[in-house]
Image: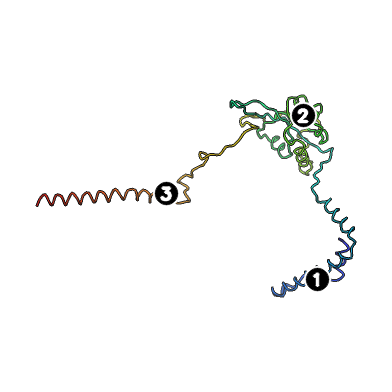
Amino acid sequence: MTSSVALLHCVGCLPHVTSARQGPYRLCNAQRVHSQRQLICLRSFTSQQPAQGRCSQIQTQAGLHGDDWSTAPDSYLTLGLAHCFEKKDDGKLQDKFVIEPITANSLECMAAGAKTCFKHVTSLRFEEAMTKDRSMLPDTFSEGLFCEDFDFRCGASARTWQRSHAQDNLLDIVPLGQNKSNFNYNLDEKRVLNFENVVDDSDNVKQDMSIDVYGRQKDDEVDASQQASPDASDNKVTEEAEDEMDALLSA
């Protein structure tokens, strides 16, 4: 890549700064000429390179920007014991304790006093968590079950702890190898693991008339006037018929 840039500099094909006094059509033509020259130079340069060399460069770039999401084995990680529930067929809730990784921002909120269903939080190395060995966890985690996608979620959570803010300010919330339980543990809003959200028409919220932006009030007035107008016409016809009948009888 360096040699290609140097080649472009040598032949003078890289775009240069143009004067602001040039007109728009003249500027576009200049850009077009530069683009054509760049394409010709790059083609001639790559054609001179061996195919094996080009493939090795591509493989190197793919290695730098690929989908390798590996996490260092000694990365800091926090695991929490979440008090969840599971709904049975009879509608009753049964306690369920789940071992889940906790991200840096989530633990920061918990430390600030936010309500949480985590009873206990411990910290350990990423490689220790990947073993799923309960002997490496405190005794309070013995009744918990590992959450779904545990490995993937642990990797994602461990990467949040590699950020500068977490490294500088949050590692002392739960020091490595310790267990903390002094969070705002609260079950007012229960986490139901097998909850299914079924949406129906009753979930629709009708907008209050005081903030009517769709003209519904005018539509209602028009409908009311249309409903009232047939009654008025019927009364008028009835009065005319009665007047005619009185006239005939009087004659």
How packed is label 2: few (under 14 Cα within 10 Å), some, or many (20 or more)? some
Residue at x 75% of width, y 33% of height: 79
Q: Position of residue 245 (x, y in %)?
A: 15, 50
Tell me which residue sits at (78%, 39%) in the image.
Answer: 155
Comparing labels 3 and 1, the label whose residue is closer to the camera: 1
- Mark 2 falls on what kind of element? strand
Residue 138 in the image: state x and y as whole percent. 78, 26
The residue type indicated by label 2 comes to Asn
Q: Which of the marked residues, 3 or 1, is nearer the chain's N terminus?
A: 1
Residue carrying label 1: 37
Q: Which residue is mark 2?
A: 179
In space, the residues marked 3 and 1 are separated at their CA atoms by 66 Å
> Which amino acid type corresponds to the residue marked 1 in the rendered image?
Arg
The label on residue 217 is 3
Q: Residue furthest front?
A: 51
Specify few, some or many for label 3: CA neighbours under 10 Å numbering under 14, 14-19, or 20 or more: few
Residue 214 against residue 177 in the figure, above or below = below
Q: Nearer the viewer, residue 245 or 13?
A: 245
